Amino acid sequence: MTSIASGPTGTGDASRPARHPSRFRESGVRARHLRAHVLVVTWLGLALLAVAAQDSLSISRWLAVHMFLLGAVTTAILIWSEHFAVALLHARLPDERLGTARLATANIAVAGLLIGVWSATPVLTAVFAALLVAAATAHLVMLVRLGRGALGGRLKPIVSSYRAATAALIAGTLLGWLLSNGGAGPDRYAGLRLAHLHVTLLGWIGLPVLGTLFMLWPTVLGVRMKERTTKVSRWVLALTGSGLLVTVTALALGWRWPAVAGLALYVEGVALAVNLFVRTVRGHRPVSAAAVWMLAAATCWLLVAVAADLALLASRSLANAQSGIDTLMPVLLIGFVAQILIGALTYLLPVVLCGGHEERAAVRAVLERGWLPRLVVLNTGILLAALPLPGPATTTGVLLAALAGAAFLGLAMVVLARSGRSPEKGTSRNPALRGTAAGVALTVLAVLVANSGGADTGTGTSAAGTSHAADGEVRIVAVTLAHMRVRPARVEVAPGTALRLKVTNDDAQRHDLKVENGPATPMLGKGDTRVLDLGTITDDREAWCTLPGHRAAGMSMDIVVKDGTADAPDGHSGHTTTATAGGLDLGADFSPGWKARDAELAPAPGGKLHKLELHADHTTVEVAPGVRQQMWTFGGTAPGPTLRGTVSDVFEITLVNDDKDMGHGIDFHAGSLAPDRPMRTLQPGERLVYRFRAEKAGAWLYHCSTAPMLQHMGNGMYGAVVIDPPGLPKVDREYLLVSSELYLGTPGSTAQVTKMRQGDPDAWRFNGVANQYAKQPLKAKAGERARFWVVAAGPTDGIAFHIVGTVFDTVYKEGTHLLKPGDPGGAQVLDLAPAQGGFVETTFPEAGHYAFVDHDMRHAEAGAHGMVEVTD
C-alpha cells in the first residue's frame, strides 16, 4: 500500500513504522505546512472565542461555525489534499509560491466574508465570495494539472474526491453568498439553505474525508490495505458524488423527493466505506490509538447523521425539515468534522513537524495526553447536544465538547510552539509560530475581560424602559417571527410611548429579534416567546433577525414615531384599511411571484353530467401577505374548486383521501340524498364516488363532513357550488367570493382549536386569502353590469357584503329574488348567515376604485376587503 508518510515517489508498508516523508525535509514545503497548521489552530481558537463571546446572538454562533468550517477545516483540506494528491499520483510538487498564494488568498477571502456578513455589507460579502471562488478554482485547476502526465498509483481515484470536493466548495460559496444577500427570497430560502448545508458539509468536507480515510485508516491502524480498497473507493465516490449532486440540485429547486433519492445514494456510499473500514481492523497495535478511536467515532457519527438526515427529509416538508436538520448540526460539526480533524492532526502533525521516528513518537505522545478522557467527554457532549433533552442538557453537551476541543487546541499550540525552537540553542527558529500562539492567548484574555460583566441578552426588560414607563402611554405589541418575515412589519407609536414587544417565533426555524440601539432576544425555538422593553420611544428604529441573510431577505420591522394619525377622507374612503390583525401586517407585501385567486366565475359548462375528481390532502399556501400556513384542502386549494351547472344537472364527484394522517368526507348542500354512505369518512387512501342531482338553484356550500367539522372547515375544507336559476340573464362580469375566517397556527393544535371555539379568528378573508384583492384588484369597465356571487363558508361568522359607491338593483338570496331590476327600491348589503349564499348585481357608473367589504367593520379591517378597479 502507499504510505501517507512516504514521499510522492515512494511506497511503504503500513505494518512497519511510518517513514519520515522525504518531501518534508525540504525546508520550503515544511515551512508552508507549519504555517498552514498555525492557521488551522488559529481559526480553531477564534471559533471557540466566538462561542464564548455572546452566545445569545445568532451572528456569534454563525461566526463560530464559519470560522471553524471555512477557516480551520478549509485550510486543512486545501493543504492536505494537495499533499496527498502529489503522493498518490506520484506527481511533481506544484510551484511553492503559487501554493502559498492560493492558501493566503483563501484565508483572506474567508476573513473578508466573515467581516462582510457580520457588518451586513453586501458589497464586501460579494467581493470576498468571488475571491474565495477564485482561490477554490485555482486549487481545482492545480489538482487537475497534477493528474496530467503523472505516474499514478493504486489510490489514484481518491484524487477525484478532492476535485469533486473543490467543486462543492465553489457551489457552497455561491449558495452562501445568495443566502447572505437575501437573493433567495422567503419562498426559496428553506431549499437553498438546505442545499448550502449539504453541499458544504457532505461535499466540501465529507467527500475528501471519506477519500482520505481509505489510506489514512489502515496507515493509522498499522495494517496492510485491503485489496478491494481501490474498487470500493471508486464505488463510494460514484455513489456519494452523484447522490450529493442530485440532492443539492433538488433542494435548490425545492424538490423534496428527488433530494431524498439523492441522499439515499449518499448514505449507501458512506455505509459501503464504513463496511470496508470495519473489515480492515486487525489485532495489531495501532500506530496511534487516539487517532484510531477518534477517526472511528467521527465516521460513525457521519453515518448516523446522514441516515437521520435522510429520515427527516423523507418525512417532512423542506421548511419543517430545517429544524430537525439543525438539531443534527452538533453531530456533524463536532462529532464528525471536529473529531475527524482532531484525530487526523493527532497523527499528521508529528509527520509534518518531525524528522525521525523517535521525534515523531515524542510529539505524538504530547498530542495524545489524556486522549481517552477527552474522547469520552467529547462524545458524551455530542450525545447530550443531539438528543431531544431540556435546554440545560444541550448547553452542558456543547460545553463538554468545547472543553475537549480546547484541551486538544492547547496541546497543539504547545507542539507548534516547540517546533519553532532550535534544539541546540533553545531559541525561536520561526517567530511566527510563537507570535501566533501569543496572539491567540491575548485574544482569549481580551474577550474574557470584555465579557466578564455579562452581556444584556434582551430576555427581560431594559433599565431605560423601566425608568420611563410611567412617563407616557405603555403599549404592548405582539410580534411574530415566521416565514422570513416579522409581523407586523411596521409599528407606529406616538412620541413618549413606552413600547414593549412580545416576540414569538412561530417558525420551524430558529430566529431572534435585535432592536437598533436597543435590546435583543436570544435565539428562539418554535413557540418560544420573549418580551423586549424598548423604553420610551422618541425616534424611529429598525428591528431585525440577526441570522445572516435573514435581514437581507426581508426579516425586519420598522418602529415609526408619528404625531397622531391622519384624518380619514370624506365619504366612504374610510372603508379602505391597512390595519393589522392578530399580529398580521395586512399592508405588507405578498411573496414574490404570488398571484391572487382568480375570482371570475366561468359560465356553466354544457352537458347535463359534470365529473370531477377531488383529492383531500394537506397543502401549504399563502393565507395573508407574507404568511404561509398548512391548510387541509380539497383539490389543493382553500376554498376548493368551484362547481357550476344548471337545475337538473348531475354531478359525479370522485373523492380521494390522499391525507396520510386523518380521515375526510364531503357534504354537498346542493344535493338531496341520504348522507349515510356518500358523506361517510374516508380513511387514508380510500376513495368514493358521490353522485347527486341539482334539483334547486342557488349558491351552495360544500365542506368536509368529518367531525370535528369546525376544525376541518376552519382549516380550509370547503368550496362553492353555483346552480343557475332558470333564465338567468347574461352580465358583463361575474365574480365569486367565498368568505371565511382565518385561524393561524398548526392545524388541530390546542392553541388553534381554542381560537376556533372562542370565535376569535386572526383575520377574515375572501377566497381563502386575507387582503388579496386589495393588493390585486378585480377589474371592470365603466357602464358594465357585474354580478357578485357570495357564499359564507364560516365556519362561524356570516357576512354583510357591500360595495362602496354602488347600489344593488338585484338581490338573490337562498334560492329567491329579494330585489329585481325595475323595482323602485335598491339594496346596500347582501347579508348571509354561515352556509348561506346568493348574488347581487350592480352597474359601475364611472371609472374609479370601488372598495368591497364585509360591513362588519371588525371583519373588514382584518382582511375581508378588496377593490374593484373600474376603467373607462
Image (cartoon, helix red, strand yellow):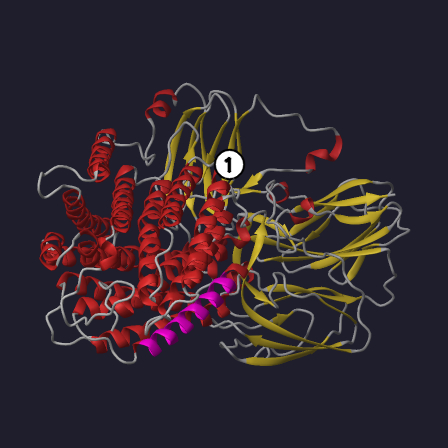
Q: Nearer the viewer, residue 577 or 147?
A: 147
Mark 1 lies on a secondary structure that is strand
Relative image position of residue 754 (x, y in whole percent): 44, 53
Left of 777 or right of it: where is 299? left
In screen coordinates, is 628 left or right of 569? left
Q: Residue at x 80, y 71 (%)?
A: 605
In which quadrant will I find the N terminus?
A: bottom left
Residue 197 visible in this rendered orientation of the protein: yes
Q: In the displayed structure, does residue 822 sit left or right of residue 115?
A: right
Which is more toward the observer, 519 or 58? 58
Residue position for label 1? 557
Q: Which residues are magenta?
A: 230-251
Q: Does 561 sit above or below residue 658?
A: above
Indicate the position of residue 627 as horizontal and vertical percent values. Answer: 54, 50
Would you say residue 98 sits in the magenta stretch?
A: no
Question: Is 232 inside the magenta-drawn segment?
Answer: yes
Residue 521's x, y, as percent? 36, 38
Which residue type carries mark 1? Answer: Met
Tell me which residue sits at (53%, 72%) in the image: 664
Q: Residue at x 38, y 75 (%)?
A: 234
Magenta-colored segment: predominant secondary structure: helix
In the picture, measured across the screen, residue 546 lies left or right of residue 865, that is left
Q: Quadrant of residue 375?
A: bottom left
Question: Residue drawn at (36%, 40%), measured in percent from left and top?
Answer: 530
Looking at the rendered image, the quarter that the C terminus falls into is top right
Determine whether 853 is above or below 6 in the image: above
Residue 851 location in percent, x, y? 73, 42
Q: Nearer the viewer, residue 775 or 694?
A: 775
